[in-house]
Amino acid sequence: MTRKLYWLAFKVGDEYKLSPYRCESRQDAMRHGMEHVLDRELVAVFSEDAGFTVDEMLDLATFMQRPGSVFLRPEE
């Protein structure tokens, strides 16, 4: 598999910041953001394929469902 660029959006206080991360899947990017970056709250993960600008990603991060949210989990 190839490593793609993902943008991890974090909430830091009242601000939102982006951090680039290269990995094989969106799940790997989410795991990294939730398990290895402990001083920030992961709020969104964007793939480079989405085509959003930095400003668009920061704007979307303010109201997207958080990764791992019960609203995003498949029904059992």
Image (tube, rainbow, N blue to C red):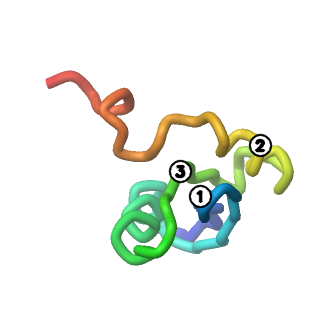
Residue at image mark 3? 43
Label 1–label 3 contact, CB within 8 A = yes
Residue at image mark 1? 11
Residue 32 place in picture, x, y as percent: 42, 70
Residue at image mark 2? 59
Q: Residue at x 54, y 69 (%)?
A: 2
Q: Could you tell whether 60 is left or right of 73 in the image? A: right
Label 1 residue SS: strand
Q: Residue at x 65, y 61 (%)?
A: 7
Which residue is at the front of the view, 1 or 13? 13
Label 2–label 3 contact, CB within 8 A = no
Label 1, label 2: how far apart the Cα atoms are: 12 Å
Residue 16 place in picture, x, y as percent: 69, 57
Label 3 residue SS: strand
Q: Quadrant of residue 48?
A: bottom right
Q: Residues within 10 Å of mark 3 (few under 14, many from 20)?
A: many
Which residue occupies the extreme front position in the image? Answer: 14
Label 1–label 2 contact, CB within 8 A = no
Q: Is residue 72 above or below residue 42?
A: above
- What kind of residue is marked 1? Lys
Which residue occupies the extreme top position in the image? Answer: 75
Label 2 residue SS: helix
Label 2, label 3: how far apart the Cα atoms are: 12 Å
For marks 1 and 3, give the one nearer the viewer.
Answer: 1
Q: Could you tell whether 26 is left or right of 44 in the image? A: left
- What kind of residue is marked 3? Val
Label 1, label 3: how far apart the Cα atoms are: 6 Å
Give the tally of numbered discs.
3
